[in-house]
Amino acid sequence: MAVEALKLIRETEEEGRRLLGEAKGNAAVIAKDADQEINRLKENAGEAEKSLALAISDKYAKEGETEGKAIQANAEAEAERLRVAAESNLDSAVNLVLERILGLR
């Protein structure tokens, strides 16, 4: 009976060592898989970040271009308004200068 008990203890210890080895092996596989998944997620996040940055950059570049065109159009309209005003005042300014030079006024 003591022999059987010692045999049972030994078998139990061996089974425990085998199960512990399997658990360590499984833990190593799980850790490796987790590392690979983390790396994959980091890659995907990096690609998504680049894509988002490009989309934002394109959006604001287009908005800036549109705003620039509006500013350009306003500036051209203002320049034209000033040119027309200057042209309409040219004759009276020339006459005023001539009158002063000639002492007519």
Image (cartoon, helix red, strand yellow):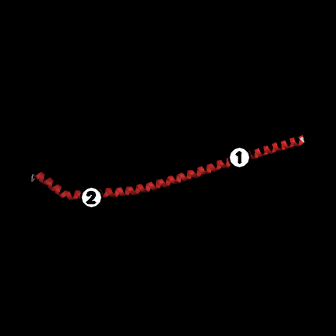
Residue 65: mark = none
Q: Nearer the viewer, residue 11 or 97?
A: 11
> For numbered disc 1, what is the local secondary structure?
helix
x then y, percent, for residue 93: 17, 55
Label 1: how many Cα within 10 Å (few below 14, some 14–19, many 20+):
few
Q: Residue at x 47, y 55 (%)?
A: 58
Label 2: how many Cα within 10 Å (few below 14, some 14–19, many 20+):
few
Q: Which quarter of the image is occupied by the N terminus?
A: top right
- The residue type indicated by label 2 comes to Arg
Left or right of 72: which side holds 24?
right
User: Which residue lies under the disc numbered 1?
Assistant: 27
Query: Looking at the image, is mark 2 or mark 1 earlier in the sequence?
Result: 1
- The residue type indicated by label 1 comes to Ala
> For numbered disc 2, what is the local secondary structure?
helix
Image quadrant where residue 67 sits? bottom left
x then y, percent, for residue 21: 76, 44
x then y, percent, for residue 79: 29, 56
Q: Residue at x 14, y 54 (%)?
A: 96
| Residues at circles 2 and 1 in contact by the CB criterion of under 8 Å | no
Up-down: is 94 above or below 3? below
User: Which residue lies under the disc numbered 2?
Assistant: 81
Q: Residue at x 24, y 59 (%)?
A: 84
Q: Nearer the viewer, residue 87 or 57?
A: 57
Left or right of 100: which side holds 18?
right
Q: Residue furthest front?
A: 1
Can you tell which of label 2 and label 1 is closer to the viewer? 1
Left or right of 105: which side holds 48?
right
Q: Residue furthest left?
A: 104
Q: Please tell me how many numbered marks the rendered image carries.
A: 2
